[in-house]
Every structure is written in C-alpha cells, then in structure tokens.
Image (cartoon, rainbow, N blue to C red):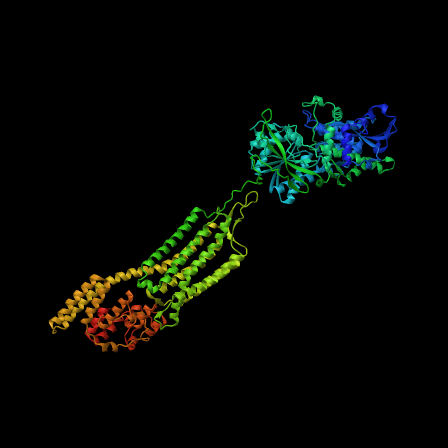
Amino acid sequence: MRRAAVLLSLLSTAITAYDLDYFDRLRTDESLVSSAEKSPANADRMWQVSTPEGDTFSLAQITAFLPFSDGTSIREAVEDDLAATLLAIHHFNNPELSPHLNPEDLADCNIKLTAEFHDTRYSPIDSTRRFTNILQRENMLSEPLPAGVIGAYRSAVTSPLAILTGVNDIPQISYASTSTDFDVKEQYPLFGRTIQSSTGEALVALELFKSLGASHVGVLFVTDAFGSALQKAFQDAASEEGIVTDSVAFSYSADLEGSEIPNAVESLKKTQFKLFYVIAFEVHYESIMKAAHAQGLIGDDFLWIFDGFDSATFHRNAVYPPGSPLALATAGVGLIGIEGGLRSEIQYPNVETVPALVENPETSYEKFRTAWRTTIEDADFEAYARSRMPEGLEEIAGYDPDYTFGLEAVSYTPFLYDAITGLGMAYCRAANGTDNQLFIGEDVFTQFANSDFYGATGRVKIQNDTGTRDHTTELFVLLNAQPQEELDENGNQVYKLVPTDYYESGWKPIENRDFLHAGGSTATPKSLPEPEMEMNYIGNTGRAVGYTLMGIVAVGAIAAFVWLLWFKNERVVRSSQPLFLFMVALGSLVMASSIIPLSLEEPVPESGLDAACMSAPWLYLSGAVIAFSSLLAKTRGVRHAYINPDLDFIHVTSFDIFGTFSVLYLVNFIVLITWQFVAPLEWNRVDRESTDIFDRAVESYGTCSNDDALPFVVVIIILNISILIVANWWAYQARNIETEYHESRYIGISMASILQAWCMGIPILIVVWDNPQAKFFVQAGIIFVTALAVLLLIFVPKMLAIRTDLVKAAEESKRLAYTSFTNRARNKEDFEGDDEEDKAHPVDQSDTNTKEFSDESPEAAIIAAAATFARTESVDKSSEEERPKIGGKAGSSASFKDSKRSFGRGGGLVESISKSMRFSSGALSTDDADPKVAAAAAGGIRVTHNPRSARNLEVSGGREYSRAQLEHLEGVPAEEIENFEEGEEDVEAPLREADEERGAEQGDTRTLSQ
C-alpha cells in the first residue's frame, strides 16, 4: 500500500531517479560520460559507462522487433507495444517506480537497459535481413550490438531470429510467439517467452470446446509456424480426449480476394461440423467470414472461435454496414484472448469511455493498470514514446503521428512488459552469479528459465527446461462479439466484445455475462447436424391395426354382456352360469385393453411411457386371469366327472370360480407387484448398429426395458404357461365327457388356443423384439387371439343353442300334433267295437286342445299332444320290465338313457315332457322331479359320456360303437349285444326282431320313436 502511494506520487510529479531518456543520452551525449569502455560481460556487448557524478553503469542494448505494420498499412495499437517496452525499461532502470520490482533485489545490479525498435512487417525475410545488418555493424556506444532481443510477434518471424540469436549467444524473449517448435532447445537454445507455447494454448482451447460439449471440431489454420504448431498441438490433445478434428489449411500470404480461403471454408462445410476453431490473424478475418456467409455456415447453428487475434485490433476493425455479410457473420463469434488480468467490463470499439481504476489495487494486474494509466497520461512520456518510433513509418498508409495511446493496456501489451522485466532481472542475476560480472548470453537465458516472479500479467513462472511460461499461470478470456443496438456516426454496425468466460485452471463463467450467438440464443450449437435418424415408430398405421383388433374384441365383449343380460333367464345361460359367462367377457375386454399402452411411443412424455410400460403386463395378465380362472374352474369340474364316472351332474359354484380366480390372481399379483417396485420397465430408445460417417447411430427403436426385469418376465411366463398346460391336460383327460351344449369341448378348445398362441407367439416376439412395428403386431396378435378365441368359443355356441332350441320347440309342437292325430287314427281301427262317444271324443278333444295349445306356444302344444296320445295309448308295463338295463346303475346312466325310447309309454312321456317343460321354465318343484332333473334345477351341470369314455365302453361290452348305435343298445339284453360284431352298422334288425316278439303294437311304437 505504501509503495503504491509512493509510486503514484512520483509518477504524478513526473520526477524520477533517472529521466526517461537519461540512459539513451548517455550513449549519445559525451558530456554526460566521463569514460566508456566495452564490458567483458555478455561477450563484449555491454558498455560500461562512468558519469561525472561518479556513477558507473553497464548499459545493455535491447533490440525490439515489433509488428508496427504489414508493409502497406499501420497495425492498430502497435504504439501501445512500444509504450509498454519503454515503461518496462523505465521501471527496471528505476525499480522504486515499479509496482512489481523490489528495489532491494536490484540494489547490487548496475545494469541499465536501453532499446532500439524495428518494424518486422510480419515478414521473416525482412526481419532476418534487418537483424543480420545489426549484427554486422561496428559495436559503438552510440550504436551498440544487441545484448538481448525482444520479439517477435509472429512465430514465423521469430523462428529465423531465434536461430540467429542462438548462434550469436544473444538471449531472445518473445511476448507473443507460441509455436511449440521453440521448445526444442537444440534448435533454439536461447529462446524464452512470457507466453505459453502452442501446447499450452491448445490445451486451453480444448478445455473450452470440452466445456461446450464438443465431440467434433473443424480446424481452419494458417500454415505458418504459429498456426501449424497450434493446429498440431490441438489435434493431438483432442485425439487424446476422444474429440474428432478435421483440419483445413491456407497460407499466410493467401490472396484475401482470391479463392484459397473460400475453398478452405468450403472444405470445412463438407465436414458437416458445426463448431469451428480458427487459428489465424486479424488480416484474414473478413475473407474467412465472407466465405462462411456464402457457404451458409453462420447463425445459431454454428459457432466460430478465433485464436491468435489481437482483441484490440479486432474490435476497432469490426465496423460493417448493417445487414452486410460481414455484419451478419460477426454477430456471435468468439475470441480466445490472453489478458494480463480479469476485467469483466464490456469493451466498446471507438468509444472513449474507459473503465475506472481500482482505488486500492492489490493484484499485480491492477497495479500495472494504475501505473500504465498514470504514465500514459503524462505528456512527457507521450512525447518521449513518439520520438522512439522507428524510422520509415511515416511513409506507410494509416500512420498517425498524433496517435493517442490507449488508456488500457490490452492484448499482448502486458506480456511485452513482463518480457522486458524478466530479461532485465535475468541480467542482474547472471551478473551477481559470476565473478567480475563475466557472464554470457547462455547464463542470462539460464537465469530467465528459472524465473518465477509477479509482473503485469500476474505470476510469471517459466519452465526451466524450455524457457516457456507455464500456461497455468496465465489468464485466458473468451470474448463474445455482440452487435450494439446503436449504429455509429456513419450508420455502421459496431460490436461490443463481452468477456463471458475466463480460464484459471479450467473455464469458468463470468457472472451476468451470457455468450450470445448470431440469433441471440444462449444455447451452444451441437457439434454435428442431427442425424437422419430412422426412429422405427409403430406409426399410425400400426396403431390403427392394433386398435382395430382391440375394437373387434371390445365390440364382441360388449355384445356378449348385452346378450347375457337379455337371455339371462334362458336355460342355456343358467346351465352355463351367468357368472362364468360374465368373467369370460370381462377378461377378454381387459386383455384387449392392454393393446393401448403397448401402442404408445414418442411424443408421449417419458413419464407417461414409463407408466405405460408396466401397465401393459398388469392389464393383460389381469384379464387373462379373470377369463382363465372361470375356464379352469369348469375344466376342473368336468375332470371331477372323469375321475368319478358314476356322476351325471357336476356342481361348479360361484365360490369355485371366485376361489380359482383369487388363487391365480394372488400368485400373479405377488410377482407383478415385486416387479413393479424392484425393476419396473422403463421406456428407452435403443440404437441399432447402423451408423453414419460420424459413427453415430442412424437407426433406433423404442422399447420398454430394464436390465433387472428378466427374472420377473421368466417367472411370469413359466408360471402361467405351467398352469395353462395343466388345464389343457385336464381338458384332454376329460375329452370324452361333455357337458350340456358341448360346453366342456369349447372350453378345452379355447384353452388349447391360448396355449398355442403363447407357445407360438412368444418365440416370434423374441425374434422381432428390436422391430417395433413387427413386435407390436405380434403382441396385438397374441392378445387378439387369446381374447377373441375365449370369447367366441364360449359365447357363440350358446347363442346358436338358444336359437336352435327355439326352432326345435316350434318344430316339436307341430310334430307332436301330427303324431297325436296319426296315433289316434291307428287306435281307432284297433278299438272299433268301443263306444262311439269313447272313440270320437278323445280325437275331437285332442284336436281341439292341440290346436288351441299350438296356437298359444310350442311348449303348450307339446304337452297337449302328449296328453292326447297318452289317453289313447295302451302299453303292457310288464314288457318294459322284461328289457333289462345294460351297464351302470339306475340314476347314473349316460345322457341318452334319460330319453324315453317311444311315445308308446304314455304316462312316462307325459311325465318326461311335463318335467322338461317345467325345468325349462324354472317352475319345477323338488316334490315331483326325478333325481337328475332335481340336480339340474339345483345348479348342477349335466355331463355326457362320449362313446369312447370308460363308462360307455363298459355299456358296449368293450366295443366302440357310434353314439346312435349305443342309443339303440339301451335296453337290449347283454346276450343280444354279444351277437353284434364290432363295427356293425345295422343294429336295428335285432331290435326289430325283439320288438316283433313283444307284439306289433310295441313294434309300431318303437318305429314311431325312432
């Protein structure tokens, strides 16, 4: 704090220990020198001077090669570089004025610096020729040989100079040349720099692109020492980080109006990259961005980052007509700048407003800013600096003798200041480290390579093996060119350079400073264009197919519900149990609804897709259990009849159905709920192996997956298929046992259909798993087949049975009416001797009754016809007892044994028809019902044994007859059956012979019944 105050006081009064030009005048004004001789130090390149006041100094001449022009035009702000050199020399010669040097460290050092300046014109040839001439001149006090070299700016210019300085044992320090080649000490033994090498700069640039999420970067570089070295270092570093680069070069001397740069930009376009790293100079900027505009490489979809630019020169030159290609292309570009310290204020071009100084500077950079501002504003310093400009500049276009020095030391100016300071301190340490100050240029370089001091750019740590500054001690800033709202006085678009990020051991954002792209977006463009991705969506067509299949099942289920409610009192429905039918329809509908979540895909939100992934197995398995449990309960009951052949009725209660459902659903629920919480399916988009030229997947498919879900899927499949296999085995065992309306047969077929659909569909599903359209079609097909098969096989036969019963009832009424009149005619002939009234009345009455009942309903007509026939029937009941029952116990015979063989048994026919009618209408009382009918009325399901069943094989004596043959065998004595040969179709002949023996009347009756 005290030193800063002293410094400000001394600078403000312009009083120094030595005037600005004091040591310059010692070389030219003999009156100031009492003696002068060549010093043996530094190979006789220093002059030892004594003054009349008794002071002795060793004067070291510094030759500074700076780019004042390009040979045709003056470089912007180059005067500031000269001023920085002079300020650094002045501070070294007067360490008490320096904001960084400690006077005590230089107390024993009598070396003082002077300087001469030369324009490199950015040309290595001009610079080399000029330096060669300097080395050939006679070493005089007024024109001494250089004791050290500062510069140059371009690496291409620095390279030949560094070779010459190495050969001539002259230490050379650069402030801007970054080529990695200079680290090769065998070729450049005495070259050092206060700036990082290309390797360090490449690492910083790479860190920037990494922070932007870059995967591919196009590199456009100038083929000089600087550009080539930085490009190679960047490419090598990017390769290690897995970032792909594609580099395109152009020559430094390329015609700015020619085709070389546009061709290079066109080559960049062919890479299809969207992030570009340009290693060039300000002179190339307009040609590059004009070509970029022409190639359509500007806008929010592209990002251009420039390296190697002088920010001060850039923002002074960035003035373009509004709407012009350059005005549009400049908006949103970025510049990697090297700064002495962090300044968050916006830099405006062509504006006199200068950021204020820090009142009590603490950092090295802020101290330098204060010293710079104070010195630049001093008129004596300004006049002195103007006098030191190299000769010949006045002949170059753009030279302004009244140039106003910048109040801010920007870009490389602070690094130049540190180069002078570091070289001067190296001289002093070399002198102090040798006897009689006998040191050479190599000693000076060695001392510089071991430097670690604080200067204008903060800490300056030099790598002792290369003489290059450690890049981690430098500050890099990302500047964003943003168009100003106001145009300048000439109506041109100007830009402000906004510092948005800075590098200190990694890139960090500056608060409230967003990087804006051309369109004002803050989003970083992607490295590559979006691939033409084949998403393999199910698509509207696929969904339409799935929804159509679901709609068919849904319509069928709803129709089944309506039919069930409409015919709920019919015997067909009641014998099948409404609960059973309801669960079949409900299960089919729930199964079909699982097609909806299976059909979902993008753009449905991911949360919705995740929910759909698990809802599909929940819906399908729930529906399958609902429908299958009722089928299994019925199958289990039929199998009970298989195990117990004497049963004519089975009982499947609501408790049986609900119990089966509860067990099946509980088992599936446990697996599903565990699956839901442990490894729920989630929506993922999986890339296929197809790739584009960038090795990016160009084809993907969406699927529900979870790496830990496989065990649950396997358990679900094995569990349900096992249960289904058991159910099918039960159905197969009971295949020769049928329930009323062949219900057991259709239940077995439906379960076989489900098993077949699963066994065929699951392997196909595995094969087409990565094809969403095929997978969805297979899934929908499995659901459709299992749901519709159950629905149709259970309901359609019952619908047809009801229709058939209605038709048969009508036909039966007509047939019985006709039969009653026919029998009456026959009986009339047999009983001619009876009373006329007894013969006529029954016929007339039966005709009347039958006609009346047939007019009312088929059932009434049947009863009337049967009653009429019974009144005229004369049957010898003892003959019935003579025909023995064959096979089985009474009351547990096959279904065909419940039918009366003929209408000749009047009372039996009336009783059977009456009971049948009353059972159908639900009016049967247990008082007058036989055991079979009573069992049916109590909710039992009547079972029928097929010809191949064990029970009927017993009836037939072990022979396989058709159902018709077995029906004819009922009541035939066992000894008569033994006379039949197996497979004989005409079994009626023995029956007719038996009937003839029992009388013609009974034969007529049997014929009629057949």
User: What is the x, y in percent for residue 202?
Assistant: 67, 39
- Quadrant assignment, res 386: top right
Looking at the rendered image, the quarter that the C terminus falls into is bottom left
Nearer to the camera, 206 or 927: 927
Image-based side of 98 in relation to 544, left or right: right
Residue at the top extreme, as displayed = 395
Q: Nearer the viewer, residue 40 or 963?
A: 40
Residue 875 spot, x, y in % from top left: 20, 75
Task: Judge left or right: residue 335 versus residue 167.
Answer: left
164 on left or right of 931: right
Q: Quadrant of the N terminus?
A: top right
Residue at 76% x, 41% y is 465
- Residue 890 percent location from the top left of the image: 31, 75
- Give the residue drawn at x 25%, y 77%: 881
Count of marks, rendered view: 0
Query: Residue 183: image x %, image y %?
Result: 73, 39
Vertical order, 400 against 439 (above or below): above
Give the quadrant of residue 291: top right
> Can residue 731 be seen in the rendering of this structure?
no
Q: Is residue 686 depicted above or below 198 in this figure?
A: below
Q: Can residue 659 be spotted in the picture?
A: yes
Q: Quadrant of residue 643?
A: bottom left
